[in-house]
Amino acid sequence: GEGSITGTIIGAFVMSVLTNGLRILSVPQEWQTVVTGTILVLAVYMDLIRRRA
């Protein structure tokens, strides 16, 4: 696949902020995993749609 260093850094930053935010809100670990997985799936889907256009 294709990618960039900037995109990787932004993605890592977003996931880090998401994880820390969920911890601060005292979201149970199981739900943190669900939310993180959902965000990853949505990001891949959005990239797929963007590449088809």
Image: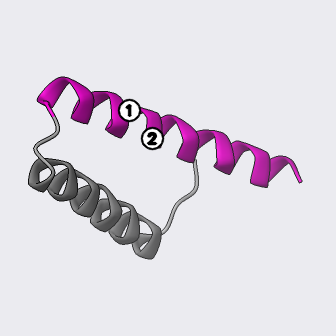
- Residue type, numbered disc 1: Gly
Q: Residue at coordinates 17% horizontally, 39% vertically from top-left?
A: 27
Which quarter shows the C terminus?
bottom right
Dot 2 corresponds to which residue? 40
18 sits left or right of 24 in the view: right
Q: Position of residue 14 (x, y in %)?
A: 34, 63
- Circles 1 and 2, Cβ within 8 Å, touching? The answer is yes
In terms of secondary structure, where does tag 2 sit?
helix
40 sits left or right of 19 in the view: right
Figure quadrant of residue 31: top left
Main secondary structure of the magenta stretch: helix
Q: Position of residue 9 (x, y in %)?
A: 33, 70
* Residues packed near mark 1 inside 10 Å, few (<14), some (14 to 19) or many (20 plus): few
In terms of secondary structure, where does tag 1 sit?
helix
- Residue type, numbered disc 2: Leu
Stretch of the chain drawn in magenta:
28-53
Q: In the orientation shown, which residue stands out farthest toward the right? A: 53
The stretch drawn in magenta includes residue 11: no
Labelled disc at residue 48: none
Dot 1 corresponds to which residue? 37
| Depth check, front residue: 51 or 26 | 26
